[in-house]
Image: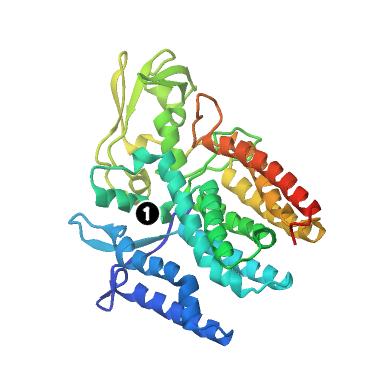
């Protein structure tokens, strides 16, 4: 796990990086390169602005307004810069790899590869927006506060994680549909070209999840392959809050944790916790256990375990393990699954009988793998009164839609409505 790769200062040579500063200048330079590239291909500036102007405008607004809102601040509330997260770097690497492969595939398929470059900003913005909104809606209590500016800042702090693949599919699909319909490009033909490239993006994105510590699996035991995460990481804090890190197994309710089993020689047993105890674990507000454990920062308060029988037990950072219990490396499994799907759909493309088959493959194959992976993930709870997570419910819907779309495109092909 490597959450932060480097930090960008608030200003360089007296000029701010974010807002009206160096990054905006960089965006302007990239746009200038795009214009020069387009003109070498016979596109005018007006054509480029008509096709991509909205997206470039959104990017400029993000640099000027949104990024300054999510800068890190010191105790006095002054901006001090922005941390470059491993998750964000892998996310952008996935986007670059996806666009590059799509450009190559479009040229090989006899399509204008410039369409890929023109469509990429739309799909990127739509995919990020959909992925973030899906996550924000699912975990809305974490983002919505009484302060509107703070709420907006929480929503747009997506480079630290909190993007849902299914949301990116929905947002990217909507943006691509708008672009293709506007330019009167056959959706199914272009979809079959693009779909394998999507999964190379997912491949990099899941490696970003590994670096961030999100999308983690449940506790596993040898000989199952497992991975541990440092103090302060999402799986560590989840295991601490729910008991396993302390050696406690039990059932959670509104009244707290009902202890069913205490592991021998565990921290819980040494502190006198017994089966049948009713516990409540109180964590200090905004504690960064990773900084406490690795950088020697003093913890603001002790962790407190409270219960009717034991009263209050205090734990210091030194009492806690340095790493989480081993968990299933679901991020690695997801990354491998995405790479395999990319290869399978890539090599199936020449053998398709009609347009839309590769797209239907995405709607069927990815949800099957995701449904199974959700069984060993513990970062989502069951929905609608069942043990199935929201992602598993979406998977079921996508599989059904995938089979229906396959039947529909086959019928259209037989009627010679598809080219």
Could you tell me which residue is drawn at 61 percent across and 47 percent down?
Answer: 334
Residue 238 percent location from the top left of the image: 43, 35
Could you tell me which residue is drawn at 47 percent across and 82 percent down?
Answer: 45
Secondary element at tag 1: loop
Residue in front for this viewpoint, 120 or 337: 120
Could you tell me which residue is drawn at 69 percent across and 42 percent down?
Answer: 404
Q: How is the image coloured?
A: rainbow
Residue 306 percent location from the top left of the image: 30, 22
Task: Give left or right: position of 222 versus 20.
Answer: right
Q: Which residue is mark 1?
A: 157
Q: In which quadrant will I find the C terminus?
A: bottom right
Say which quarter of the image contains residue 190.
bottom right
Residue in front for this viewpoint, 160 or 227: 160
Residue 166, relative to residue 243: is it above or below? below
Residue 322 can be seen, yes or no: no
- Counting the numbered discs, the total is 1
Residue 314 can be seen, yes or no: yes
Residue 107 percent location from the top left of the image: 69, 73
Say which quarter of the image contains residue 301.
top left
Residue 397, relative to residue 104: is it above or below? above
Could you tell me which residue is drawn at 38 percent across and 46 percent down?
Answer: 290
């Amino acid at each position: 796990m490597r959450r932060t790769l480097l930090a960008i200062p608030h200003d360089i040579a007296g000029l701010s990086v974010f807002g009206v500063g160096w990054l905006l200048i960089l965006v302007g330079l990239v746009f200038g390169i795009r214009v020069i590239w387009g003109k070498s291909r016979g596109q005018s500036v007006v054509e480029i602005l008509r096709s991509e102007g909205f997206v470039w405008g959104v990017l400029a607004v993000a640099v000027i307004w949104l990024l300054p809102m999510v800068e890190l601040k010191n105790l006095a509330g002054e901006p001090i810069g922005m941390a470059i997260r491993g998750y964000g770097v892998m996310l952008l690497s996935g986007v670059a790899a996806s666009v590059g492969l799509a450009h190559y595939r479009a040229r090989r398929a006899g399509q204008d590869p410039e369409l890929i470059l023109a469509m990429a900003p739309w799909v990127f913005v739509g995919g990020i927006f959909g992925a973030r909104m899906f996550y924000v809606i699912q975990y809305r209590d974490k983002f919505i506060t009484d302060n509107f500016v703070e709420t907006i800042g929480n929503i747009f702090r997506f480079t630290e994680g909190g993007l849902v693949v299914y949301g990116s599919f929905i947002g990217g699909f909507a943006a691509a549909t708008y672009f293709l319909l506007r330019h009167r490009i056959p959706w199914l033909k272009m979809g079959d070209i693009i779909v394998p490239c999507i999964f190379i993006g997912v491949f990099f994105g899941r490696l970003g999840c590994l670096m961030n510590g999100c999308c983690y699996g449940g506790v596993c035991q040898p000989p199952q392959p497992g991975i541990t995460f440092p103090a302060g990481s999402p799986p560590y804090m989840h295991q601490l809050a729910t008991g396993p890190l302390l050696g406690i197994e039990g059932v959670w309710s509104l009244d707290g944790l009902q202890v069913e089993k205490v592991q021998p020689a565990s921290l819980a047993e040494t502190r006198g916790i017994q089966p049948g105890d009713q516990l409540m674990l109180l964590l200090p507000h905004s504690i960064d256990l990773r900084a406490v454990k690795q950088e020697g920062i003093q913890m603001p308060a002790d962790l407190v375990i409270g219960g009717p029988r034991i009263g209050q037990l205090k734990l210091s950072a030194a009492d806690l393990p340095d790493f989480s219990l081993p968990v299933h490396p679901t991020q690695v499994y997801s990354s491998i699954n995405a790479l395999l799907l990319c290869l399978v759909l890539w090599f199936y493309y020449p053998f398709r009988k009609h347009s839309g088959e590769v797209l239907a493959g995405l709607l069927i194959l990815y949800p099957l793998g995701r449904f199974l992976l959700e069984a060993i993930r513990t970062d989502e709870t069951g929905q609608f009164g069942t043990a199935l997570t929201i992602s598993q419910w979406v998977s079921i819907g996508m599989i059904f839609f995938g089979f229906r779309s396959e039947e529909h495109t086959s019928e259209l092909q037989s009627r010679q409505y598809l080219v």
